[in-house]
Structures are given as structure tokens and as C-alpha cells.
Amino acid sequence: MRSLLLLSSALTGCSDYFLDGENRLVNTAVVSESFTQAPLPAVDVLFVIDSTGSMAEEQAGFGSAAGGFVDVIETLGLDYQIGVISMDLDDGGVLLGVPWILTPSQDGVSASLARNLVVGTGSAPPSMGLDCASLALTDPTGVNTGFRRSDAALHVIFVSDGDDESGEVLGADPVAAFAAQLADAAAATGRSARASAVVGDVPDGCTGSGGTALPGARYMAVAEASGGTVASICAGDFTAVGSDVGSVVADWQLSFPLQGDPLDGSVTVTLDGVRAGSGWVIDHAGPSLVFQTAPPPDAFIEVTYSLAGV
Amino acid sequence: MLGWLAPLWLCFLNGALAAELLDGWEFEEDDGGCVAEGQTAQWEWGEVTGGPGAAHSGARAWALSLDGGYLNDTVDTLTCPAVDLSTATRPVVQFEQWFDFFAGDAGHVEVDDGSGWRVVSPLYAVVPDLVGQSGSWLTASVDLSGASGPVALRWVVVADASGVGGGWFIDDLRWWDGDPVAPQIDDVDVLGDTDDVMVARAVSATVRDDVGLTSVVLRYVVDGGAAQETVMAADADVWTAALPGGPPDTTVAYQVLARDGENETVSPAVAFRYFLPAPDNLRLDAQRAVGHTLPLAWGPPFGGHIIEGYRVYRDEVLVAEVSTPRADVPVTGGVDSFTVVAVFGEGEGDPSAPLEITASIPTVTALSPAEGWPGDHLHVGLTGAYLLLTDGRVTATLGEGISVGVSIRDVDSAVLDVQIAADAEPGGRDLVIGTPSGVTTALGVFTVLDGDDRPRLNEAELAVWQGDTATLQLTYVGEMATDEPSVDLGPDIVIDSAVAVSGGLTVSCVVSGDAAVGDRAVTVDDGVRIFDGATLTVRNSTTQGTGNGCVSAPHGGLVAAVGAAAALLSRRKRGM
């Protein structure tokens, strides 16, 4: 949301005065615009599911939590696309299920996601979640066409009761390579690119209703490096896990376009009524107000500035 | 004693060698007076529970032993009472037997016509000894020609010291005079399917009879038609005849019939097909089954036949004819079953193994708005399924006189920027969407309306001064989709608020002192349609005469608001 408040218009009797870049007095109009921070509307979510034999109960549990996950991201108002792949490199990172890209305009997204998450348990080790996710995102064959959008944030969610054994695609240091791939994705879209991990606890693993899970150190490392969340696959309550992951999926706006081009030095910014002296810049090319760190959801942002030449 | 055998006796009365039943035992009501003897005397009469699981007829028989198995390292006999054959011209004894002997064990049959026990071989048997397994109940016949007077019969089992089989079972003993034994047919050629279409095929069989064959024929049926017969020619015991060749996809069933004048034997039927080979490895030649048509590919059939082309069938309906092993075929979106056949000079070959495909059909489910007037500029929401819309790689057309831009939201939805030329022909239009995955056409989904009712701004002479804060009053034709439309007055004019009510639009704005002087178009976007038709003039503040630059002289619909009063213009509006 945005609003504009005309505070005053300049010149004698109703003017403000301001020095321009050449130290000349200029008359100005002071205007104010306000915004309410809202969730980023576009995010692509990739679930990467372990498909080895030990994952049957976990897959079923996670599938039943799909509704909770979808509820979370729909409540956040996200324009989402959701895809699911397995950790079996033989599957080549191909998005699974029909439809293989879930969007808000489809009917029964929760049921579709629940179905798609059950990728089967017929894969033989090794489980290569990072390699598979990399293939799914680079999509060398075009089979996942349309999944990644040029203006969408990205969130990759790894679900496994073992650790990653990648290397065939990402090389000797798959954690670093995949983190770099996420960073590249963020740079290309201007949106965040994160990973979350629903894996066995580090360093000792864990035991839950689905059996024993080995520590998912690599997946955790990627999640922590990218700002995602980590949850235990042994927690049993997959609805809570889905909700937790869903809340992290949201990505908030950094840049707020302005209607006018502010005079340098004339801008004041408040967040929820508190003046913010730093942490933002004016991009005159927009023009726009750009924060270094996104204001939290529902934050009320007010920017007051002067227009030149009034 | 004769029981059910009596009807059989009547059956064999015809002809010179008609068989007359002299005597017999079913072993159902009694043991026939037979006696178990030998080292362990293990033959027993009663209800069969072992071995074949049941007697040949009724429930009871003689057995070694009734519950299966026998003792090791023994010689035992089952001897039945002698029958007087003094009046018989060609005596034959028959019985039913089932046997399962362990390796090293054997059985045989002996008769005694008063000159002592002698081993006899059943008709058609190579050797007298029974070894191994019979597999089922079999009829054994022993020609006793030459015997006269009372003749006794006994079964002898010789078991060694290691292992036992399932035993030996005897039932339905009959003594005949005549020819009760049907010809024996063995080793009938079993012909398999062949791609040598129209080529005749020979069938041979070994046929024997204990008295003499009167005819041997090859009976065959082509594709379930009427049975036909051809006489087989003999070379010793081997009889041969040829089946006529058949066209592709012809099934021929055949059997050998042998007659000895009294009895007839028919071999089990055998069937084969004349065929031309099928393509193999029919497959979807794409990674996803999405599209109105899908590419199929297959491997050419084997063999030396010259392939002239291929035909692809969907649920047995021809959908494609091609010359190479690949075709784009239409799909329904349900479960489609495809087969492909090769076409040879000799005809159509066998179908491939079916390939079932459930395709995802790209579909436009909604277009909103779905109509517009000539001259309109619209934001048309497009929603579909499996459209696979991809940033920067999608085209859309609505036909002549309409330009369409595409802004992708996700794989299934987009916003079309539709500009209809003023001279566009009214009527229905097809939406054609092109993506890297293919082309989707939605027939008649958009209509260019006829008439001059296009919603638009009314013409007005509006003017503001550089540095103004101003309120503009405009009017418009038609309905706006929102009462807070987005207004664009061009560079350096900041819109504070815009409120549309009942055909009137009030716009509050601030004009930068840097705003370019001159005329500019006023555009109002209500989210569905861009209203145009009005012009705003920005005037140079230095020519404004008395007063200061923040005052605008009213011109036409322009209302100026000045200074602190303008603070009241604040109004939230939708951003981003």
C-alpha cells in the first residue's frame, strides 16, 4: 500500500526552501508517501524428497502436512509455484506429479501437493539431493520449463532421513556449489534464494515414529548458509514443520517506488513511526526508496521528501 | 461287475473288427478277486487318496499304495483272476493306470495262459517296463492274440533299495475280443507363428495302429471358418500333408485324424498365425505428455520385408500415416491407447504393444474480460492449465487489428495487454498462444464488440502550471472497475489521489517545477481498461503573471488547491 501526502508547496507564504546541488536556494514542495510492507507476491518452492526405502512413513507424514504448508503460503498472499523432485539422480531433477507445477489458480493444490510429495521409495542409495536440486533448477533439458520465474524468489526444501551424497553434478564441494547456485539465483532475480532442511539432527541423528534418521549435515549447512530454516525429520509433527518452512518461504520487499524524484538530502524515512536515519538509499533511476534489509511484514513506512522547482 | 462298461460294449459291435467286451472290473464295488502277493504284498484296494488323487472312475482302485508311495527293495505283484479267452479271435486286455516310479524302480505286466507267466508289452510301447511318471491316467492295451483258454494277468513292481515314487494305480480292467484300440498319433509337428505369409507349410506326424489304418487326414480351420481336410501321405509311420499359405493376420488351427475302420484318434489341436512383424519399443518421444499432439517414436519391425510406411491407431482409430518411425499424434486428455503397425507390400503388419498415455492438454480456462470495443486498451487476465507459460518466451495473438502483449504471472496465468485497433473488425476471435512447448488455440474466446460504446474519458481542456498542486475534474463514458483508478499524467506530475464516482473522476496532483511544458495525454487505468481521450496542458510558471508559482488559474475543469490546504489531499491508495 502506498499513499501520498502533500505537506506544503513552496514560495512566499507557503514555501519551504532548500539548497540544490550547487548551493542555490530553490523552492520546493514537500511530499510524503507511505507504504505498508507486504509479502513478495512471487516465490518458487522446490521440494526435494528422499526416495530411498526408509522414507515411506516420512513421505506419508509430509504429504498429510501439505495442506498446512499451502495454507501458510496462501495466507501470506504469495503468488507461488511449487514443484517436487526426488533425490534419485536417475530421475534427473525432473519435476514429478501431475500437474508438476502447482499454482494458486489450480483447484485442489493441497491435495496435489500431498500426492506429489509421495515420490516413492524405490530408489537405491546414494541419495543426492543437492545434485538433483541443481539439475532441477538449471533444467538442462527444458523439462521443467516454466518453473523458475525471472521475478520470483526461490525456496528449496530438502527432506531426508540421511545425508546428501552429491558430487556427480556439483563436484567435490556440493554444499559450497549449491550455496553459490542459490546466490546466483538471488542475484539474477533480485529476490531471495534460500534452502531449508527437514533432516536428521546433527551430529547424532535422531529417532522418531518414522524410524532412525542419520544427521543431515550437508543439507543443514546449505540451509544455514542461505538463511533458511532447519527442522528435525524426527519431530513427527509434519504439519508444524510445513508451517515453519512456509513462514520462511515468504520474501519481503526491499524497494518501494516513489512517484517523484526527491531532492538529495530532503528525505526522511520512518518505520512504524520511528525515524530510520540509515539502512536505506534513494535510487533516483526509479525513483525508489531502497532498504538494505527488508522492513518486516505489515511495517508502516513513511517517506517525506522535497520535489524540486516548485 | 460290468457296470458302466456295458454302453461301451454296444459301441464297438459294428464292423468286422468290432470289439466285444468279454469281461471287466471297475474295482468300485469289489476288488475283482485280485490278490496282492510278493515280498511285502503291498498292493491294496480301496479309495484312492494318494498318487493321482482319485480313481480313474468312481472312488476305488487297486494301488501301490492307496495313499501314495511304496516300500523299498521289494518285488510285489497284483494278480487278477483268469478270464476264458477260448472263444476270442483277437483278445485284448485294457486297463487304466497312473504311475510314478523312482529312478531304479519299474513296473511291467505279465500274463499266464497256462504256460507260465510271461512279460507282455502294451501296444505302442517301446519297451515293456514302465519307468518314470505317467503324468495322468493312461489307457494301456495288451494284444493277447494267440492266447486261448483261461488267461490270468498280473502287475509286477520291482523296487530297489533307494527312494520311492508316488506309486502305481490300476483301475477299470476290461477284456475284449476285437479291436478296441484306437490309432496312436505321436510327434505332430507344432508349427509356430510365421512371417512367411502365403507360403504353404508341411505338417508331419507319426501314426500307428495295432490292426491297420484306414485313413489319416490333416484337418484345419482358417480364421475360425469351416473345417477342411487334406489326406496325409505315409512314409512308413510318418504321415505328411501341407497346409495352404495364408495372408497376414491369418490364424490356422490344425489336428491329425487317424482311423482304423473301427476307432478314430484325433490329435490335440495346434494353431499358428501368418503375420507380418510389428514395430517395437513404441514410446513417447518427449519427457512430458503435455500438448494437443504428442510425438511418438518406435523401432522398425524385424525381418526382410520392405516397409512402405506406418499407421498409428488411437483406440483402434487411425490417427496418423507416416513414412518414418515417428509421428505427432492427437491426444484426448483421457487415457489414450496407441498402437502402430508397419505397412508392407504384403499388407498391414501386426500392431505394436499398446502404449497408454494420459496427456495433459493445454487449456485456456478463463479470459477476463473476454470482449472489448474497437479502440480499447485492455488488461485481459488469462488463466489456463498446462499452458507452460514462460517469461519472455510466449506469444499471443487475437487476429488482425489487435496487438497483444504478454506478462507472465506463472505457468498457468498471465495478463495480456490487448490493444484493439479502431478499425478492428467486430466479431469472435481465436486466442493463439505460442510457447516453447507448442501452440494452444482457444477458439472464439474473445469478442470485438460492434458500436461506439467504448468506455473512455470525455474530451476536456485541462491545464496546470509548473509547481501547481491541483485538483482535476474529468468525466468518462462507461463504467470503471474500481473507484480508485490509477492515473498517469506523465513525467514530473505526482498523483495524490484519484476517485471515480458515477462518471466523474477527481484527480489530485502535484506538478513539479521541472515538469515539461506542453500537452500530454491523460490515461486512467482501472485495472481492466485504460481510459484515454483527455489532454492536460502544463504551462510555464514564469509566464503566470502576478502571484507565485503555486497558484493555478482555473482553466476548463482545473481546480487549484494551494499551500497548507493541499495537505487535506492526502489519501491512501494502492501501491505496488
Image (tube, coloured by chain):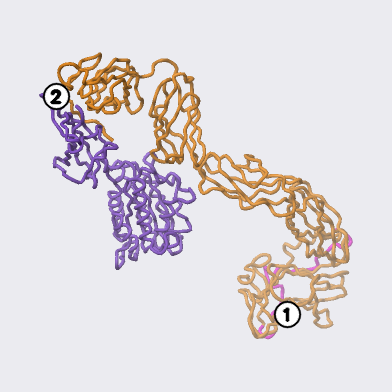
Chain colours: A purple, B orange
Q: Are marks 2 and 1 on the same chain?
A: yes
Q: Chain of mark 2?
A: B
Q: Quadrant of the C terminus of chain B?
A: top left
Circle 1 marks a residue in which chain? Answer: B
Q: Which residue shows up at 75% across the image and 67% down it?
A: B139
Q: Identify residue for label 2.
A: B563
Question: Which dot, 2 or 1, sits closer to the camera?
Answer: 2
Q: Between residue B127 and residue A107, name the one nearer to us.
A: A107
> Helix, strand, or loop for circle 2?
helix
Question: What percent of the width, then of the height, locates residue B248?
Answer: 74, 48
Q: Is residue B574 visible?
A: yes
Q: How many marks?
A: 2
Q: Position of residue B190 (x, y in %)?
A: 75, 60
Looking at the image, which residue is at 42% across and 40% down? B391
**Image height check: is B517 above or below B242?**
above
Look at the image and give the residue range highlighted in magenta. Answer: B13-40
Query: Left or right of B204: which side holds B51?
Result: left
Q: Which mark is residue B156?
A: 1
Task: Name the outermost residue toward the left.
Answer: A13
Q: Which of the image's four quarters has the N terminus of chain B?
A: bottom right
Residue type at mark 2 is: Gly
- Is A45 rendered above or below residue B31? above
Looking at the picture, which amino acid does disc 1 mark? Answer: Val
